[in-house]
Image (cartoon, coloured by chain):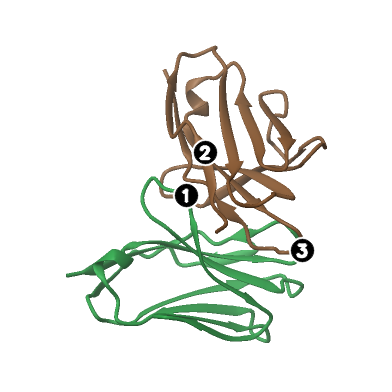
């Protein structure tokens, strides 16, 4: 079993829709949760970083962590074509990150 | 802030030669740097972790004699692919973190093609 499971998609939504992404993880020791965005042929860019359970909002992006169910989510409101990318979740309880497979998102104009 | 650069962004080399990739943290001192490999449409695979002044720690299955890592300073790490073969062709990405913070900041990646 992988430490972090993420549906690779692909996911296609119309412009302006809410994009909902999620991951599950197996190690209850994980305490740090991150979402990265990766454009094609580029390095991942850190979008959101949360510690333990709860919500965190940054502009159009909201990250949620539910440690009781080992479930993490990312919501993108008012999606734009520029949001088209691969989104990777990552978790950690020390300095090493465990990544999900990444979900490829396309926002149609 | 938290900018990481990589050089070169793209390199082609002949089979049997060695290639060096540089990773620099531009606006912070990196406590730890990481090297990843990524195949098309796949997630990141951690190759090794390096701390400044220490030997790198390699993940299981990664040949340390083939992928030489040198973390010479708090802002520079290098990955040398020795005696490269076509199967080493891949996208190599470095990342860096500092202090007690767990999030990693990634470089733009280097695409290596071995002919």
Q: Quadrant of the C terminus of chain B?
A: top left
Q: Quick one: which residue is furthest to the left in this view?
A: A109
Q: Can you identify the residue that label 1 sits on?
A: A43
Q: Is residue A72 above or below residue B7?
A: below
Tell me residue A15's x, y (percent).
Answer: 22, 76
For disc 2, the chain is B
Residue at position x 64%, y 50% in the image: B96
Q: Position of residue A5 (x, y in %)?
A: 56, 66
Q: CA distance from mark 1 to mark 3?
A: 23 Å
Left or right side of B82 for A17 = left
Image mark 3: chain: B
Q: Which mark is residue B6?
A: 2
Q: Which mark is residue B100?
A: 3
Comparing marks 1 and 3, which lies closer to the viewer?
A: 3
Say whether residue B92 is visible.
Answer: no
Mark 1 and mark 2 in contact (Cβ < 8 Å)?
A: yes
């Amino acid at each position: 079993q992988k430490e972090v499971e993420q549906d690779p998609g692909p996911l296609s939504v119309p412009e302006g829709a809410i994009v909902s992404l999620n991951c599950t993880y197996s190690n209850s020791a994980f305490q740090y949760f991150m979402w990265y965005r990766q454009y094609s042929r580029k390095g991942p860019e850190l979008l959101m970083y949360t510690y333990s359970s709860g919500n965190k909002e940054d502009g159009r992006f909201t990250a949620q962590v539910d440690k009781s169910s080992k479930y993490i989510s990312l919501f993108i409101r008012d999606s734009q074509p520029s949001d088209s990318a691969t989104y990777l979740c990552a978790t950690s309880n020390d300095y090493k990150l465990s990544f999900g497979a990444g979900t490829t998102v396309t926002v149609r104009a | 802030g938290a900018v990481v650069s990589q050089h070169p962004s793209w390199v082609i080399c002949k089979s049997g030669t060695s290639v060096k990739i540089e990773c620099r943290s531009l606006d912070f001192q990196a406590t730890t740097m990481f090297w990843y490999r990524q195949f098309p449409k796949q997630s990141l695979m951690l190759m090794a972790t390096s701390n400044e002044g220490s030997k790198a720690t390699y993940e299981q299955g990664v040949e340390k004699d083939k992928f030489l890592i040198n973390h010479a300073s708090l802002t520079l790490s290098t990955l040398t692919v020795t005696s490269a073969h076509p199967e080493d062709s891949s996208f190599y990405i470095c990342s860096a973190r500092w202090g007690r913070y767990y999030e990693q900041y990634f470089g733009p990646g280097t695409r290596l093609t071995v002919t």
